[in-house]
Image (cartoon, rainbow, N blue to C red):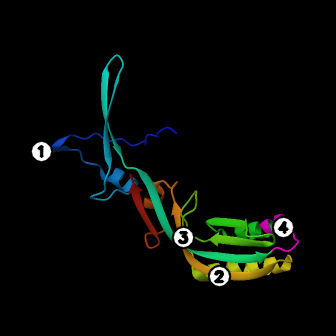
């Protein structure tokens, strides 16, 4: 993968601070990358020679990692002799109506499956409003009814809080989110 340069660039001047030289990071960039005072980073010197010699400093922040606390619905289902495709159709229909941020279906045994629907604020494409537990309970009741109507037996149903890790989120999505998610989201730069 190649680097993508941001559209905004800044001119800066090098200053002296004690025995070191420092460069100020403009507030726009610190907000865009969610930088904090004291954060560790790496600085690389880069050069290339063509007709002219060029030099650059690369400030490497690392990998942006987000942990989100979100309500999750977990169900164990007795599939019986029903096709797994039918179970997936029922889950997909509930997902179209209730928009979980993550959905998973996996087989636990010959005839037992587990459904996991996470109702977080972060999705792969956007940041949404925080979900109330009552909304998750409504989705659970609707899913349980739809599964029973399709001939599946619900063996276990529970709602719990999960910590979901996101590694592909641009920090600008969180800093510019239309909803305040700081109550349920923690982030850090990993070197």
Find out whether residue 96 is within the magenta segment: no
N-terminal label among 1 and 2: 1
Q: Is residue 164 visible?
A: yes
Pick the front one: 142 or 76 = 76
Please give the residue where the numbered disc 2 appears in the rendered image: 158
Q: Residue 46: horizontal and vertical position, in percent?
A: 33, 32
N-terminal label among 4 and 3: 4
Question: What span is in magenta?
Answer: 79-88
Farthest residue, direction left: 18
Callout 4: helix, strand or loop?
A: helix
Q: Are marks 1 and 2 in contact (CB under 8 Å)?
A: no
Q: Residues within 10 Å of mark 3 (few under 14, many from 20)?
A: few
Please give the residue where the numbered disc 1 appears in the rendered image: 19
Displayed quadrant of residue 125: bottom right
Q: Residue at x 69, y 82 (%)?
A: 157
Please give the residue where the numbered disc 4 appears in the rendered image: 86
Q: Residue at x 52, y 39 (%)?
A: 1
Q: 51 above or below 131?
A: above
Q: Are marks 1 and 3 in contact (CB under 8 Å)?
A: no
Farthest residue, direction right: 81
């Amino acid at each position: 993968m190649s680097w993508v340069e941001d559209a905004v660039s800044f001119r800066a001047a090098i200053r002296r601070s004690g025995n070191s030289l420092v460069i100020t990071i403009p507030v726009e960039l610190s907000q865009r990358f969610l930088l904090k005072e004291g954060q560790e980073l790496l600085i690389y010197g880069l050069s290339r020679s063509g007709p002219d010699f060029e030099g650059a400093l690369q400030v490497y922040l690392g990998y942006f990692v987000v942990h989100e606390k979100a309500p999750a619905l977990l169900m164990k289902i007795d599939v019986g002799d029903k096709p797994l495709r039918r179970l997936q159709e029922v889950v997909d229909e509930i997902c179209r109506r209730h928009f979980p941020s993550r959905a998973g279906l996996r087989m636990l045994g010959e005839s037992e499956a587990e459904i996991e629907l996470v109702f977080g604020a972060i999705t792969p494409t956007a940041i949404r409003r925080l979900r109330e537990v009552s909304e998750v309970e409504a989705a659970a009741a609707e899913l349980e009814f739809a599964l029973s109507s399709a001939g599946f037996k619900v063996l276990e149903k529970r709602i719990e809080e999960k910590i979901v890790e996101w590694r592909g989120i641009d920090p600008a999505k969180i800093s510019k989110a239309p909803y305040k998610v700081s109550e349920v989201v923690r982030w850090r730069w990993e070197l």
